Image (tube, rainbow, N blue to C red):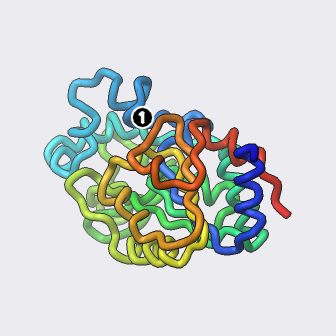
C-alpha cells in the first residue's frame, strides 16, 4: 500500500491521535533548527549557541544572551505551515487529542490548535523575575539591550526552558498522560536525541507509531510507518473526514 494511503487509513480509523513534534515541524515556516547543517548550532558566534542558551550564560552575560536571543529566536512574522494547519484541522474534527511540542514559536496555536503541551516554553511569554508581570515577544524585541519590567524595573526572562533548567512538571504530566492514552502517536520533525523530551515517547502503549523526519532516528525500527520527508509535505496530503 502507498505510504500516504496507509497513513490516511490510520488517521481515518482513530479518534485518539497525539502528535509529538520537534524543530523540523517549523523549518518549513522558515525557522532554522538547531542541529542540521544549516541550523543555529552551525553558525558562527562569539560563543556556541548551546552556551548562550544556558541558564548560567543568561545570569552572567545577560546582555550578550539577549543580543543573540533577539536576533535569532524572535521570528515574530513567521506563519504556520501545512503541518500546523493540518493538525489544527484534525483537532477540530475530533481526531487529534493533543500536540506535544519541543518548539517555542506557538505556531501550533497560531494555526488554531487548542490542546498544546509546550515542553520548552514559548518566546511569546516573558516574565519579570522580580514582580512576575508578563510581557509579549514584541516588548522584548523592541526593548533596550536588556529588557526590564515597566512596573518595577526588574529583569525580564523569557518563559523558555534554557539549558541547565528543568521542564515544567505540569506540562510534563499532561504530555505523558496524552501520549499514554493515545491509540496513534505521530512523531515528526525530531531527531529523538534530545532528552528528557525524547524520552516521553516511551509512555506510548497504543496501536500505531508513525515517524516523519528528514533523517533517520533511533526509533525508526520500532515504528509502524516511517517517512523520511518534510513534515508539511506528508501531512499536507492527508484529508480530514
Residue 183 is drawn in which quadrant? bottom right
Q: Residue at x 28, y 35 (%)?
A: 49
Q: Is residue 32 above or below residue 97?
A: above
**Which residue bears the numbered disc 1?**
72
Q: Quadrant of residue 40?
A: top left
Comparing 20 with 12, the one in front is: 12
Badge 1: residue crowd in 10 Å (few <14, some 14–19, many ≥20): few
- SS class of the residue under badge 1? helix
Pick the residue in front: 28 or 136: 28
Is residue 173 visible in the rendered structure shown here? yes
Q: How many marks?
A: 1
Q: In the picture provided, is 229 more to the left or to the right than 42?
A: right
**Position of 1 relative to 233 (above/below):** below
Left-right relation of 205 to 198: right
Q: Position of residue 8 (x, y in %)?
A: 76, 55
Tell me where residue 21 appears, x and y as whole percent: 51, 53
**Residue extending furthest toward the right:** 241
Say which residue appears at 22% left-offset and 44% top-offset. Answer: 62
**Quick one: 210 or 196, which is closer to the camera?**
210
Residue farthest top in this picture:
44
Residue nearer the viewer, 55 or 67:
55
Q: Position of residue 154 (x, y in %)?
A: 27, 60
Write the residue at 35% across / 61% down.
199
Q: Residue at x 37, y 34 (%)?
A: 35
Residue placed farthest to the front in the image? 1
Is 217 positioned to the left or the right of 239 in the image?
Answer: left
Amino acid at each position: 500500500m502507498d505510504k500516504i494511503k496507509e497513513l490516511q487509513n490510520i488517521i481515518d480509523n482513530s479518534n485518539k491521535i497525539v502528535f509529538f513534534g520537534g524543530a523540523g515541524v517549523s523549518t518549513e515556516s522558515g525557522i532554522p533548527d538547531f542541529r542540521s547543517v544549516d541550523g543555529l548550532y552551525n553558525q558562527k558566534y562569539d560563543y556556541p549557541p548551546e552556551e548562550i542558551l544556558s541558564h548560567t550564560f543568561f545570569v552572567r552575560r545577560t546582555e550578550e544572551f539577549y543580543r543573540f536571543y533577539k536576533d535569532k529566536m524572535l521570528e515574530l512574522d513567521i506563519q504556520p505551515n501545512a503541518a500546523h494547519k493540518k493538525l489544527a484541522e484534525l483537532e477540530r474534527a475530533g481526531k487529534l487529542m493533543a500536540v506535544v511540542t519541543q518548539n517555542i514559536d506557538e505556531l501550533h496555536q497560531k494555526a488554531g490548535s487548542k490542546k498544546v503541551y509546550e515542553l520548552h516554553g514559548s518566546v511569546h511569554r516573558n516574565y519579570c523575575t522580580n514582580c512576575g508581570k508578563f510581557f509579549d515577544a514584541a516588548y522584548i524585541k523592541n526593548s533596550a539591550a536588556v529588557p526590564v519590567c515597566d512596573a518595577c524595573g526588574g529583569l525580564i526572562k523569557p518563559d523558555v526552558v534554557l539549558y541547565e533548567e528543568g521542564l515544567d512538571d505540569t506540562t510534563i504530566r499532561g504530555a505523558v498522560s496524552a501520549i499514554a492514552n493515545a491509540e496513534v502517536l505521530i512523531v515528526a520533525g525530531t531527531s529523538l536525541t534530545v532528552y528528557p523530551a525524547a524520552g516521553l515517547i516511551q509512555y506510548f502503549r497504543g496501536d500505531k507509531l508513525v515517524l516523519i523526519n528528514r533523517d533517520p532516528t533511533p526509533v525508526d525500527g520500532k515504528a509502524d510507518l516511517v517517512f523520511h520527508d518534510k513534515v508539511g509535505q506528508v501531512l499536507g496530503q492527508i484529508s480530514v473526514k
